[in-house]
Amino acid sequence: MEHNRKAFDKFRLNSPLIVETFKGFLELLSPNNLPHNAEDLKTNEYEADLIALNYVTGDLRNAISCLQKLSNGDQNSPSHTWELFNLDLPAMTLKHRIDILKERYYSFRTL
């Protein structure tokens, strides 16, 4: 019984390593090399950008300007990052976010 308890204590001490390893496997299996909840983050941000365009700025040019201000004019800067093994991995860049916003904006305009 004591032996099982010691094994469990060692397992509990290594749980951060297990979590990080699991996140690493998720990243490798993902089509975009990001864990599943990072993909959800991207989807949610794209939706939020479109909602802001429709209900806040009302204008594509102003919406893009707002996004550019968030990045201090550097469109290649990461919009959000995902942490894996204490490394910050970009989930998406501001340029990619702007491109998706334009694509969605124009696809709705052509319907």
Image (spheres, rainbow, N blue to C red):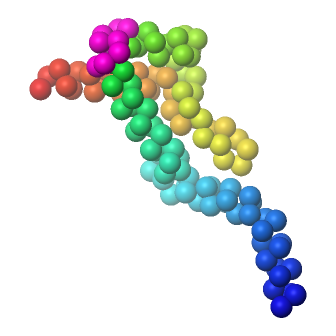
Picture coordinates of residue 59 (x, y %)?
30, 10
Segment colored magenta: 54-62
The spot of residue 33 in percent (x, y) is 52, 48
Vertical placement of 101 versus 13: above or below?
Answer: above
Q: Is residue 26 visible?
A: yes
**Splitting the image into 4 quarters, where does residue 111 fall?**
top left
Relative height, residue 87 to residue 58 (above, below): below
User: Is residue 56 located in the magenta-colored stretch of the structure?
Assistant: yes
The residue sitting at 73% across, 44% down in the picture is 86
Residue 55 located left or right of residue 24: left
Residue 46 place in picture, x, y as percent: 39, 31
Residue 5, above or below 1: above
Residue found at the far bottom of this picture = 1
Residue 6 sits in which quadrant?
A: bottom right
Residue 33 makes an appearance in the image:
no
In the image, taking residue 68 as reference, residue 43 lies left or right, namely: left
Q: Name the magenta segment's main secondary structure.
A: helix
What residue lies at 74% left-to-right and 60% top-to-bottom? 17
Q: Residue at x 49, y 13 (%)?
A: 68
Q: Residue at x 59, y 59 (%)?
A: 25
Which of the two residues, 73 or 2, is positioned nearer the viewer here?
2
Q: Quadrant of the N terminus?
A: bottom right
**Going by the image, does 22 lie left or right of 52?**
right
Tally the marks.
Answer: 0
The image shows residue 94, relative to residue 74, as above or below, that is below
